[in-house]
Image (cartoon, grey):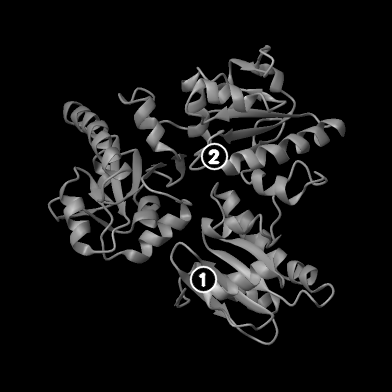
Amino acid sequence: MAGALTDVLGEVLVAADGEEVAVSALAARGVSLVGLYFGCSLGGPCAQLGASLAAFYGRFRGEAAAAGGQRLEIVFVSAEQEQQQWQEAVRAMPWLALPFADKHRKLKLWNKYRVSNIPSLIFIDASTGKVVCRNGLLVIRDDPEGLEFPWGPKPFSEVVAGPLLRNNGQTLDSSALEGSHVGVYFSAHWCPPCRSLTRVLVESYRKIKEAGQKFEILFVSADRSEDSFKQYFSEMPWLAVPYADEARRSRLNRLYGIQGIPTLIVLDSKGDVITRQGRVEVLNDIECREFPWHPKPVLELTDSNAVQLNEGPCLVLFVDSEDDGESEAAKQLIQPIAEKIIAKYKAKEEEAPLLFFVAGEDDMTDSLRDYTNLPEAAPLLTILDMSARAKYVMDVEEITPEIVEAFVSDFLADKLKPEPI
């Protein structure tokens, strides 16, 4: 256990009294699950979560005292920029914290787990370091007594089981989804980007069905009232989880670790995830020629997929797109390296630590160069880490596979020196 956890958290953590606690000591306490709490000491949602998390954690501590073992530990991964604020926050918490000085590890954790907003609570298995549940906030709300511990993932068919609706009032069982590709659509009427995507998605759904594909969409509402749900659902030709079934809607959010909407998760006929980027795929493939949108190792950077630059470190190879075939040649150059990295981390059941893009010349790319203060050179090999506001630049006359592979290897081994964005 200690090896997997030290890879994630380092050698030591800090307790509320300032004492250091060895990560290896957690095994002796009987800890089997660790909750990574990404947050800050400021008011609002983090303060609200802090109170409910403290009560939740206290139940497990009480159980540990009675049983002589502690199943759960929480580790605070702070967003604080000032050490005094961090110290005040940690003193008020009954759990452990990542040391303030370990800023590099903090950024690696934010990137590794694709944390896009705070507060966020991610449960990992203490023996393997693998993610058990990405949306711990819903665990605290739905299972405050911890009866479902350790909240591991269940098959889609089990989580979705029950009656589903059509907008004409017809009810059918979730077994109707069996054998079909399914788009699990998390959306709400109050969200303007959701309404824009829904209009496009209705046409995509129609085209896929007309092509004879076995495809269904399941709407999981985040509307604030049943009336809003009904109004929004009336525009949709697919199925929905009943609005009144809040428990099932919440379990689906937990299953896929939903942190924002709109989100479209595309599943294969067995219920396994094909892509979490259904929104991007639908907008990039209006004619649905590439359905069911298996992920590509290397993407061409566009307005619709540029949002992925904020999800973690991204390798971006800038090329002169006025040169015919330059973009395609660039994709072919970095694709074997991308495939190798993706396969390596897939074997470990982890997300790849890098996304791979080729960027041509257009207004969006120009804006990206301006924002990140990159030189106008092409080709230009970069790794951009927006959350860390850091960039790594390889400006050479010729980009070869060997140069790309060495650049990626050095980045993953923390051998490259970042420049600020």
Q: Residue placed farthest to the bottom in the image? A: 397
Q: Locate residue 234: give its quadrant.
A: top right
Q: Position of residue 228 (x, y in %)?
A: 54, 26
- Image: 418 above or below 97: below
Q: Is residue 322 left or right of residue 227?
A: right
- Image: 168 above or below 289: above
- Image: 250 above or below 377: above
**Residue named by callout 1:** 411
Q: Position of residue 152 (x, y in %)?
A: 46, 32
Q: So how many labels did they put on this image?
A: 2
Q: Is residue 417 left or right of residue 377?
A: left
The amino acid sitting under disc 1 is Phe
Which mark sits nearer the N-terminus, 1 or 2? Answer: 2
Depth check: give the residue in front, 183 or 408. Answer: 183
Question: Element at badge 2?
Answer: loop
Depth check: give the residue in front, 38 or 148. Answer: 38
